[in-house]
Image: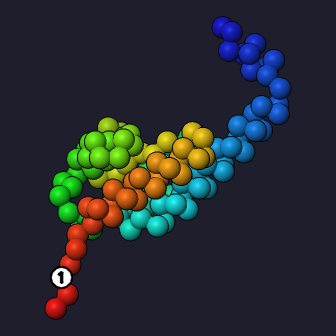
Amino acid sequence: AAVPHIIQQTDEVFFKKTINILKQTSDACVERIKDIPCISCPHKPQGSMAVMMKLNLSLLDDVSDDIDFCFKLAREESVIILPGTAVGLRNWIRITFAVDQVALEEALDRVKAFCQRHTKHVLVI
């Protein structure tokens, strides 16, 4: 019952600032993911606080699925990402970008380092 009153009493500047911050962190997330070959973003988020990204497990060694990816990422890099299986999308991941941009960039650097360590190395002869 209090929500409508709170929304009415909240200055419009707050909503505009929040939307601007989410747009900035969304853009940063999508751009940073482009540097990680095993993760792709087929659809840029619009009006949300999270984005679904596709895992290309064929590029990773010793990662069996999205759940394995997320558990190992949490254990090795202390970054928590929701496996897509939790929302019905096997081998996808859900990244929340409703965080401080500096923290988001640090987390994405850790995701990139994790993926680099687990990238399959092909021997070229």
Q: Where is residue 51 in the image (x, y as percent from the top left)?
A: 49, 48
Q: Where is residue 28 in the image (x, y as percent from the top left)?
A: 59, 56
Q: Which amino acid does label 1 sit on?
A: Leu
Residue 66, visible in the rendered structure: no
Q: Which residue is drawn at 48% across and 66% down?
A: 34
Residue 72 in the image: above or below residue 7: below
Residue extending farthest to the top is: 1
Residue extending farthest to the bottom is: 125
- Foreground: 46 or 97? 97
Residue 102 in the image: above or below residue 38: above
Residue 59, visible in the rendered structure: yes
Q: Residue at x 22, y 74 (%)?
A: 121
Q: Position of residue 30 (x, y in %)?
A: 54, 58
Mark 1 is surrounded, within 10 Å at the Cα level, by few (under 14), some (14 to 19) or many (20 or more) other residues, namely few
- Foreground: 119 or 22? 119
Left or right of 73? Residue 34 is right
- Foreground: 5 or 124? 124
Residue 40: which quarter of the image?
bottom left
Left or right of 7? Residue 86 is left
* Image quarter hosting the N terminus: top right
**What residue sits right under mark 1 in the picture?**
123
Secondary structure type for disc 1: loop
Q: Where is residue 71 in the image (x, y as percent from the top left)?
A: 26, 42
Q: Which residue is drawn at 40% across and 59% down?
A: 112
Residue 120 in the image: above or below residue 106: below
